[in-house]
Image (cartoon, rainbow, N blue to C red):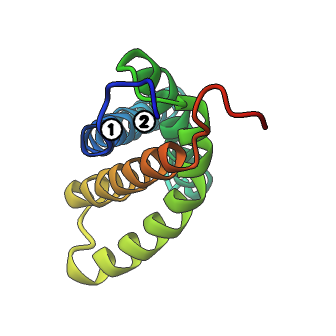
Amino acid sequence: MNSNPMTPLRAALTGAAVGAVASTVSYFAGQGVGWLVSEIAPTPDANIGLGMAMTALSFVLAPLLAWPMLRVLGVPAPGRSVLITVPFHVVFSFGLLMGASVLDPAPPFGFVWSALSFAAATALGVVVARATERPSGVPA
């Protein structure tokens, strides 16, 4: 039996909430970096490289922010959960963002779709990590 009192549903909901918060914070961190670079070195044309860097920063920062939050909230195996979350994050983000660009390509809803995809990926990662957890006392 699992010694952790957190139920699978509570773990999944906690993972979804953590994923949404981590994705939103990482998005605004990327926007802040973009604003700072634009203020320091303004360009007359579109800065495609900066936009790509902002996207990459938020994509990488979200899992790094999710791990300590999952750990603090007592989700079992937070590191393994985040490692399992990353492949789901890749699949969900590209799938949802491609579909969302058809529905609403405007920036205000871009980060909402990203937050939803990372929330779903984190919830699924937590559930899979919990399901593959070995009970204590069972040899490897």
Residue 2 against residue 111 in the figure, above or below:
above
Circle 2 sits in a helix, a strand or a loop, which is it?
Answer: helix
Which residue type does callout 1 highlight?
Answer: Ala
Residue 23 placed where, x, y %?
38, 42
Which residue type does callout 2 highlight?
Answer: Ser
Q: Residue at x 62, y 53 (%)?
A: 49
Residue where numbered disc 1 is placed: 11
Q: Residue at x 30, y 42 (%)?
A: 20
Circle 1 sits in a helix, a strand or a loop, which is it?
Answer: helix
Q: Residue at x 33, y 35 (%)?
A: 18
Q: Residue at x 42, y 49 (%)?
A: 127
Residue 128 placed where, x, y %?
50, 52
74 relative position to 20: left or right: right
Residue 47 placed where, x, y %?
55, 53
- Viewer-closest of 74 and 93: 74
Residue 116 against residue 140 in the figure, above or below:
below
Which of the 4 image quarters holds residue 17?
Answer: top left
Furthest-bottom residue in this view: 102
Residue where numbered disc 2 is placed: 26
Which of the 4 image quarters holds residue 32?
Answer: top left
Residue 74 placed where, x, y %?
39, 20
Residue 76 against residue 55 in the figure, above or below:
above
Furthest-top residue in this view: 72
- Viewer-closest of 12 and 62: 12
- Viewer-closest of 77 and 92: 77
Tell me the crowding category of disc 2: few under 14, some 14 to 19, or many 20 or more residues within 10 angstroms, Cα based.
many
The quadrant of the picture occupied by the C terminus is top right
In primary-sequence order, the first of circles 2 and 1 is 1
Tell me the crowding category of disc 1: few under 14, some 14 to 19, or many 20 or more residues within 10 angstroms, Cα based.
many
